[in-house]
Image (spheres, grey):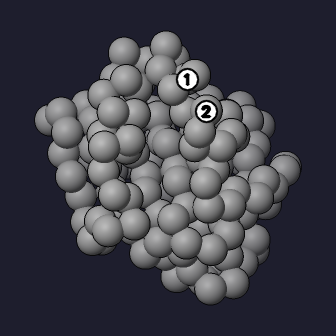
Amino acid sequence: MVVDTLENLEKYASLNPLFAQAIAYLRSTDLNALEVGKTVLKENDLIVNVQQTAPKTKEQAKLETHHAFIDIQIPLSGIEVMGYTAAKDCKPADAPYNAEKDITFFEGPADDYITVKQGMFAIFFPQDGHAPGITPTGVKKIVVKIKA
């Protein structure tokens, strides 16, 4: 997991061959003007999702992991708290891995919680269990899905 400010995003371009393309899109686009929905930058490999989340408490937020994709999560409005637990320490839930949606959900609270404000981002790799969307009011956010 990585948490940093958007001004430093380029420093992480070497982490994955598709990061440079994702960063170029993020830098050349008015992110706040984007409508909720999905933009495919590279079929099956690089997708930008704009979401409007509902309010969620720590108790309501479920830990999740992805096998095939890395998430870059960027809150555009408000403040979002994101839970973190190493995937190896997550407690399995009754629901198995959903390959179509590339997601596994887990039981219990996260080990740690990180506040991610406007102007910041968080990167979650397949080994990172994360519980995003914890906010009293909901947030507009971008989730960039990058093939791992």
Which image quarter: residue 133? bottom right
Tell me the quadrant of the picture where the N terminus can be found: top right
From the viewer's perspective, is residue 50 above or below residue 122? below
Which residue occupies the foreground of this view, 102 or 34?
Answer: 34
Position in image of residue 2 (x %, y %): 67, 34
- Element under disc 1: helix
Seen from this angle, which residue lies furthest right?
A: 111
Label 1 environment density (alpha carbons within 10 Å; few <14, some 14–19, many ≥20): some
Q: Residue furthest left?
A: 43
Is label 1 or label 2 in front? 2
Residue identified by numbered label 2? 8
Residue sitting nearer the eye, 32 or 145: 32
Circle 2 — which element? Answer: helix
User: Percent x, y for residue 114?
Assistant: 78, 53
Residue name at image x 63 percent, y 50 percent: 120
Q: Residue at x 62, y 61 (%)?
A: 118
Q: Which mark is residue 12?
A: 1
Q: Is the residue marked by circle 2 packed among few (<14), some (14-19), or many (20+) residues within 10 Å?
A: few
Image quadrant in which the C terminus is located: top left
CB-based contact (under 8 Å), mark 1 and mark 2: yes
